[in-house]
Image (spheres, grey):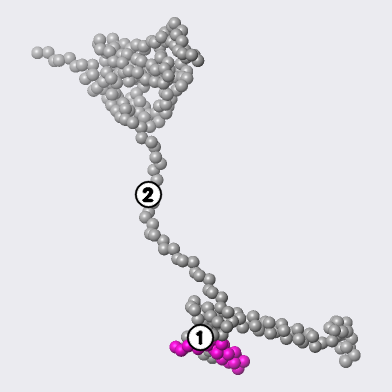
Amino acid sequence: MTDKKKSVYETLAKVDVKPLLEKKGNLNYLSWAKAWGLVKSLYPDATYQIKEFPEYVLTKESWLATGRNVDYRQTIAGTEVEVTVTIEDQSYSSKLYVMDYRNKVIAKPTYFEINKTQMRCLVKALAFAGLGLDVYAGEDLPEQPQQKQTAPKPAQKPVRRQAAPRKPKKMTKDQLYGYQADYSGEKKFLVTIYTECDKQKKMGLDAKTSVPIEWWHKKLKENSADGEAVRQFTEMTIAANKKKQAKAKIEQSNGIPDYAKDPEVEKAIEDAIS
């Protein structure tokens, strides 16, 4: 009993082409020269044929036949080539459009680009016969749009927005004089506390030796209603003292004869007195 002869596909499918693959971008491909050399070593009578088509030229009106044949076909979609491989009386054909390195159709290819596509088409026809068919696995899948991969952002805790501090309402003079603050657990008019502070300052006391002065200094730094009232009362008294001092200077200036205000006259008076 004789062994059944293996088919062309069974023979070529068992050939490991992985050591012969080359890298082009992100794709693996099998050189046409290596692929055809492998087939010819197994099937010396194998042949291939590049199909010829009637040539047409696109004019403004329509496609115009030139009357000659070429080994490619021009279509609205692009330039197409077709190759047929014959191995032991079995034919395997493949078609390809002329494309660039991004696998995009070239609108007006050169003959060099057409010839390269014909050789790629030859390799694909050999794949239909069984040689390196797995190289083309997945090429018919639809392309997915490439998206930039970014590292996931860590979850952020919600930030509580603090309300902007309200500007303290400016109190009138009457309101400040009528304001009662918490003084050692009891309500007391600010003007009364300020008067005690003023008396004890004149006695030479300070915040270390005077309870009212110590209380006043503490409230100046305190973020409270009493603190704001103390600050406004202090500003009011400072402004009042400045006005009083200015008024005193004016009155003092008005009591001096005009001629005595002249620097030269003043010097002459001083010389006469001395």
2, 115: nearer the viewer: 115
Q: Quadrant of residue 86?
A: top left
Q: Residues within 10 Å of mark 2 (few under 14, many from 20)?
A: few
Q: Earlier in the sequence, mark 1 or mark 2?
A: 2
Q: Quadrant of the C terminus?
A: bottom right
Q: Is residue 191 magenta?
A: yes
| Disc 2 element | loop
| Residue drawn at 45 percent across, 65 percent down | 162
Is 206 on the left or on the right of 9, as rendered?
right
Disc 2 residue type? Pro
Q: Is residue 215 above or below residue 126?
A: below
258, 215: nearer the viewer: 258
Which segment did they paint magenta?
Answer: 185-203
Q: Is residue 238 above or below residue 154?
A: below
152, 170: nearer the viewer: 170
Q: How far apart are labels 1 and 2 at the CA level?
A: 59 Å
| Residue drawn at 88 percent across, 88 percent down | 269
Is 138 on the left or on the right of 269, as rendered?
left
| Disc 1 element | strand
Task: Provide the residue designation for mark 2.
Answer: 152
| Residue drawn at 29 percent across, 21 percent down | 127
Q: Residues within 10 Å of mark 1 (few under 14, many from 20)?
A: some
The picture places residue 37, in percent across and down from the top left corner, at 32, 16
The picture places residue 49, in percent across and down from the top left corner, at 34, 11
* Chief SS of the magenta region: helix
Choose mark 1 or mark 2, whichever is in front: 1
Residue that protrudes farthest toward the left in the picture? 1
Q: Is residue 78 above or below residue 179?
A: above
Task: Provide the residue designation for mark 1.
Answer: 180
